[in-house]
Image (spheres, helix red, strand yellow):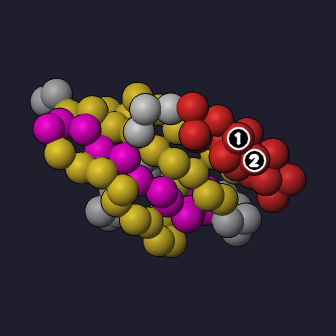
Amino acid sequence: MSKFPVSDHIDVIEGNTLYKEDGWWRAVILYTKKDSSKKKLALYWWVHNDSWQRIGKWQAESKGQWEKEKQAMDSWISRADI
């Protein structure tokens, strides 16, 4: 059983909790689907009510997509109040 609340169809290879408090949990997870050996990388968001429920997932589909999205975030980060 995974230490992350993911679907039974997923085998977590490795993961890292980025944030977990006040009923919110966010983690980056390297995984495979049970029927595949292809490694995938995703950022998950969960909220805890009676149990942990996934409310979001972003998955890197390719290195090119990742670079494009990272560049977009990098170009906007200075505009945010963070």
Q: Residue at x 47, y 71 (%)?
A: 14
Residues in magenta? 22-34
- Relative height, residue 61 to residue 13 (above, below): above
- Relative height, residue 48 to residue 29 (above, below): above
Q: Residue tagged by mark 2? A: 71
Foreground pick, 40 / 36: 40
Q: Residue tagged by mark 1? A: 75
Q: Residue furthest bottom?
A: 13
- Relative height, residue 63 to residue 77 (above, below): below
Foreground pick, 27 / 74: 74
Q: Residue at x 65, y 41 (%)?
A: 73
Classify 10 Å Cα crowding around label 2: few (below 14), some (14-19), many (20 and above).
Answer: few
Does the magenta portion include 33?
A: yes
SS state under label 1: helix
SS state under label 2: helix
* Residue 41: quadrant of the picture: bottom right
Q: Is residue 66 left or right of residue 12?
A: right
Q: Nearer the viewer, mark 2 or mark 1?
A: 1
Magenta span: predominant SS is strand
Q: Residue at x 13, y 30 (%)?
A: 50
Q: Which three-letter amino acid code belongs to the residue tagged 2? A: Gln
Q: Which three-letter amino acid code belongs to the residue tagged 1? A: Ser
Label at residue 26: none
